[in-house]
Amino acid sequence: MTSVTVSNKEITSKQLGIMLLALIGLGIAGGIAISNLMAEGHAAYNTNNLGLFWGFPIVIYDYFLLTSTGLAMVASMALIFGGEEYRPIIRRSLWLALAGLLGGVAVLMLELGHPLRALWAIPFSFAFSSPLYWKVMAVSFYVLSLLILQVRMMKPDWRMQDLRINAMVTLALALGVTAIAGVVYGSQSFRPFWASGDIPVAFIFESLLGGLAFIIFFTYLAYAFNAAAVPASVKRLFNDRLSTLLALAIFIHLLFVLARMSSGLYGNVEGLQVWQHIAASPLFFAEILIGLLLPLVLLMYPGTRIRPWAQILASLLVMNALLISRYEYIIGGQLVPLFKGSWAPELLSYAPSPTEWLLLLVAIFLSNAVNALGEVTLRLGREG
Amino acid sequence: MAKWGMVIDLDTCTGCQACTTACAMENNRLPGENWQDVLFYHEGTYPNVKLMWFPRPCMHCENPSCVSVCPTKATYKDPDGGFVLMDYNKCIGCKYCQVACPYGVRFYVDEKAVVQPDIRGVFPSEAGRQWDPPYKGPQDDPSRGIGIQPHGVVSKCTFCYHKVSKAPKGVADLDEDIPELKEYVPACVRVCAPKARFFGDLDQPNSNVNKMIADKRGVRLKDETGNKPQVYYLSGGATASVPSLRSMSDSDKA
Ligand code: SF4
Ligand code: SF4
């Protein structure tokens, strides 16, 4: 193992700083959001009974959930197939997967009408026909397997081969959660914008892309974006394998998005009219050109792919593009109202309310606080 | 066992919205949250414009997508009568059923009021319910979605379960013209002045509703979804008709 070029004390103090900032942010954003909710109830959200039922909080929840499963896929595949060179990112990926999930679930809880009731009503319902039932059950086992892996890796001399079975279970559960998340939307046959057999697969690639982007970004964050402090083994991994994998994942995600867009724009299937609206929006252009194509170029061009700034920028842009992608998919699928839309020509309109934006901050700050806590207490950087 | 169904004759319906009003009164609906609605729209472009209307309750589907997606079984199909009902005590307000109902007939009332002023502020409730209207129906059965809706749950039309389920066993049709049955007739059917609505047992071959569906070739809305509604429309085409598929070309924009 290569020695860490920055002292543990330094890392710890930086991480404590990040944690403090995240906690302050969480206190402010969470405080305002919860007081808005207490004052207005769900009227604080811009969803409505006209057809836009799942708004920005669901976008945030699914974004963080899919990021989490993507990180778990990256970590478990590294454990199963990767070999020692992947060691520096495995524990961090797994911890980030837990931290991200916590941020997403917190937002979901603030969206549900009866969050506490959900804790017992779902597991004991045995509602086998419901994709949401499967999703909740799969997420529960997924968290358990993440925790077991994390605990087993607390020993400083943990060996990859000892954890393979555990990693396979985690990988299967991460894939399962992601695919079921895809089924929740993809099975809605009367919402053509959502419905498609390839959605669970598209979700898996999207998650992987998110996982790769997040692990690169948060590894740099762990060293306070000081490239000189990043261990040589990590740099080697990033310059070589991870940049290539990230570029490949961007390319595959782009293919999925563009394929769906072309059939949406070309065909005249009822309900796909929303593609004309989406494909003409500045947000979509930002997603494709800045969020996906620019990082792809940065990572493919030999002069930039090994530059830390390019890797940081590329992952940050991808993280944003994925949020836009999630937003377009979940909101876009509801813009053509199912029934009133049968003859009402207009698409619905929706923009997140201030409270809904605050929930994004809640998820970001909570995940960052938990992640920084892990960096400090579990010393995730020691693997470098 | 009965399988209750409704027939709506669009040739007779005048779009008067008595059904909407009766349902709102019977079920203490908030203004704008119409379990039973009459939707107005137009087809064609000026000068060939046709004003259309379309009465639309919950279809009480035979194969309801709202039931299959519910992660808590809060939405369920009552095997005795074929009602699709809500258990307010189990609902977690995830709104998956709303997303999955192809007919847009489910309501989550905690959001901004559709109609202003928000009457919930005028008649606030102290019992954890949405509101406390001055007149309330005597029926209260949260396990079947009957009574004033609590916070954080989705609601839907019950086919007036509290009336229909008390009908004498074995009757084929609930017709408001038969004095001893009229108390059991769903509110929207009972008040329909031009008698465009009929309610009966789809499992009894000789029921009037079954005969009407056969004689006038009753159609089900969005049958392609596989939900198999238990509400049938008779659509002669003289006035209102079952809406055609969505048309979103520029020429259709008003
Ligand atoms: S119309 Fe909608 S709410 Fe009613 S039973 Fe069918 S799917 Fe469920
Ligand atoms: S909102 Fe309630 S009834 Fe609807 S799917 Fe969720 S738990 Fe079931």
Image (cartoon, coloured by chain):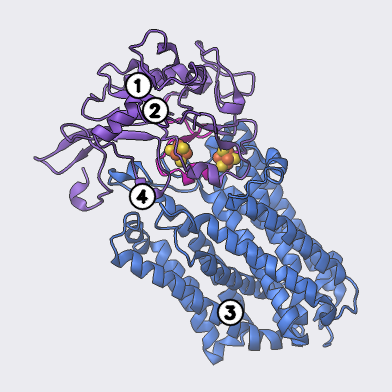
Chain colours: A blue, B purple
Percent across and percent down for residue A103 are 68, 55
Q: Residues within 10 Å of mark 4 (few under 14, many from 20)?
A: few
- Residue sitting at 59 percent across and 85 percent down? A244
Viewer-nearest of discs 1 and 4: 4
Q: What residue did someone put label 1 on?
A: B19
Q: Give me the chain letter of mark 2.
A: B
Q: Quick one: SS at disc 2?
A: loop
Q: Is residue B157 left or right of residue B189?
A: right
Q: CA distance from mark 2 to mark 1?
A: 7 Å
Q: Is residue B112 left or right of residue A227?
A: left
Q: Are marks 1 and 4 in contact (CB under 8 Å)?
A: no
Percent across and percent down for residue B50 are 15, 36
Q: Give me the chain letter of mark 4.
A: B
Q: Quick one: SS at disc 3?
A: helix
Q: Residues within 10 Å of mark 2 (few under 14, many from 20)?
A: many
Q: What residue did someone put label 2 on?
A: B36
Percent across and percent down for residue A310 are 58, 81
